[in-house]
């Protein structure tokens, strides 16, 4: 095979690899698929569904829930830092109710016998803060460059400069990742003593995303830097989560997972975007699969 | 007997791949989303009947995707219009803003792939998006393994001529 053909195939691989649907497509389509489930398999879809017995069912569920849980709503100002969680913040009833699970996340053990996790076990606190932001056009950045932009050959510097000139450089702690042609400013949240970055359900970084072409910023998009609603949720123990690592799907069923990172995953649902703590498993730094860190009883099944 | 993986796993693993395969053969992300949605809706309904022993999940899903793309072309007859437009207007009519909007690397290469004959487009997309072997690609495209390889290398040859180094 010639070098020229090698190069062409490399470019084809990069080209096809860069074709991805928009960020909200995966959860949107999954939600439509869930609506196809027959009624007896659709407990998960009961949320938000007009159902003949819904009022009575809701009363029963709420009555049961209120015995165990106390309402705890927090809408704290100040975007900086994401807010460390203390044990006093852990109310019995998290304010947001049962959380939507990250799309594709595996909540129950299944036929995962071929999967083994051999990495270090992260220390998870007993609880962590879940954040919520309305999902509207007002909460989503959309910046296009006006006129010629001064630029730097360093994409990170160019992206930072672009955001700063548009008053959109985030004030909260963030980590910067290069994702294809994009520079992503992922918000970090406190989980115990660690900072956890924000990712999408497929493990790619989520945040303010600056797209560059030839070193020139062409647009910025992502969540507006604004105060988030907060609620503390109990976490499952790391041991429990690691005892049931989700299998990498499809062809990689036999993959050995050897690394796990505590992250926050963005979950759009019901007109909101939730930022929920999660465990991101990797295998050789490539395979990614994600499992919620929130205790399963607080997740919609 | 091989266990059938949960559909959720298939969805996570193959959504992006199927979308890429579909997108490369259609005009834009909106059409690609519609067709990708159809693929997974169809797969979801048929999943109870899917036999892992008979077909790998990848081959099964790409077969559904291939049919969905054909159906889409039949319904809209967009292929003829697109090819005509591309052949008549490229490179002047090539809109890099559309590709940039979808953040596709090597946008001119994608435009060149879309100018290939249908079967060459398909074999290139399958080779780079499905992880199927040439044998499986041949099965999917109703030709032999050798014919699939030949088709692929012809596509590469045509692309080398179309895309400036």
Image (cartoon, rainbow, N blue to C red):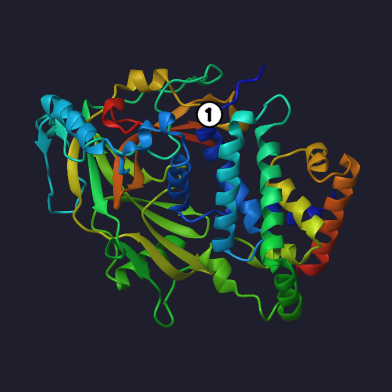
Which chain is disc 1 placed on?
A: B
Dot 1: element? loop
Observer able to see residue A16: no
In the rendered image, which residue does mark 1 sit on?
B6
Image quadrant holding the C terminus of chain B, namely bottom right
Q: Is residue A254 above or below residue A157?
A: above
As drawn, the residue found furthest toward the front would be: A52
Residue at left offset 48%, top offset 40%: A36
Q: Residue A20, percent across and down?
A: 55, 53
Q: Nearer the viewer, residue A30 or A109?
A: A30
Q: Residues within 10 Å of mark 1 (few under 14, many from 20)?
A: some
Relative to residue A251, is residue A58 drawn left or right? left
Image quadrant holding the N terminus of chain B, namely top right
Observer able to see residue A105: yes
Q: Residue B77, percent across and down?
A: 71, 67
Q: Residue B18, percent across and down?
A: 62, 47
Q: Is residue A238 above or below residue A38?
A: above
- Give residue A241's quadrant in the image: top left
Q: Nearer the viewer, residue A142 or B165?
A: A142
Q: Is residue A292 above or below residue A268?
A: above
Relative to residue A277, is residue B128 drawn left or right? right
Q: Nearer the viewer, residue A12 or B90?
A: B90
Residue at left offset 71%, top offset 24%: B53
- Give residue B118's quadrant in the image: bottom right
Q: Residue A269, percent across and down?
A: 33, 47
């Amino acid at each position: 095979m010639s070098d020229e053909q090698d190069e062409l195939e490399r470019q084809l691989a990069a080209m096809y690899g860069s074709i991805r649907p928009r960020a909200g497509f995966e959860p949107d389509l999954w939600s439509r698929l869930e609506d196809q489930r027959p009624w007896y398999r659709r407990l998960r879809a009961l949320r938000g569904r007009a159902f003949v017995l819904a009022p009575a069912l809701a009363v029963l569920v709420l009555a049961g829930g209120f015995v165990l849980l106390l309402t705890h709503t927090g809408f704290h100002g100040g975007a900086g830092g994401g807010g460390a969680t203390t044990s006093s913040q852990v109310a019995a009833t998290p304010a947001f109710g049962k959380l939507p699970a990250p799309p594709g996340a595996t909540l129950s053990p299944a036929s995962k016998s071929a999967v083994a996790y051999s990495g270090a076990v992260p220390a998870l606190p007993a609880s962590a803060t879940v954040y919520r932001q309305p999902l509207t056009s007002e909460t989503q950045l959309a910046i296009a460059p006006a006129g010629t932009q001064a630029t730097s050959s360093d994409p990170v510097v160019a992206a930072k400069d672009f955001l700063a000139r548009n008053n959109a450089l985030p004030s909260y702690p963030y980590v910067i990742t290069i994702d294809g042609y994009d520079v992503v400013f992922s918000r970090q949240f406190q989980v115990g003593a660690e900072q956890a970055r924000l990712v999408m359900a497929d493990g790619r970084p989520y945040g303010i995303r600056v797209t560059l072409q030839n070193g020139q910023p062409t647009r910025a998009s992502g969540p507006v830097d604004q105060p988030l609603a907060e609620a503390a949720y109990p976490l499952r123990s790391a041991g429990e989560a690691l005892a049931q690592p989700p299998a990498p799907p499809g062809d990689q069923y036999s993959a050995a997972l050897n690394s796990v990172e505590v992250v926050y995953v963005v979950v759009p649902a019901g007109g909101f975007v939730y930022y929920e703590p999660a465990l991101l498993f990797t295998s050789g730094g490539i395979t990614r699969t994600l499992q919620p860190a929130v205790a399963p009883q607080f997740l919609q099944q | 007997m091989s266990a059938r993986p949960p559909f959720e796993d298939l969805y996570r693993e193959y959504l992006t791949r199927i979308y890429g395969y579909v997108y490369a053969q259609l005009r834009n992300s909106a059409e690609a989303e519609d067709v990708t949605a159809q693929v997974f809706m169809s797969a979801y309904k048929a999943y109870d009947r899917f036999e892992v022993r008979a077909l790998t999940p990848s081959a099964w899903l790409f077969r559904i995707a291939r049919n969905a793309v054909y159906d889409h072309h039949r319904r809209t007859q967009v292929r003829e219009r697109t090819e005509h437009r591309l052949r008549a207007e490229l490179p002047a009519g090539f809109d890099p803003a559309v590709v940039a909007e979808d953040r596709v690397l090597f946008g001119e290469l994608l435009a060149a792939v879309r100018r290939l004959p249908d079967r060459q487009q398909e074999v290139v997309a399958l080779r780079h998006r499905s992880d199927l072997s040439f044998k499986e690609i041949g099965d999917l495209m109703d030709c032999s393994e050798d014919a699939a390889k030949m088709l692929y290398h012809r596509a590469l040859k045509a692309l080398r001529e179309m895309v400036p180094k």
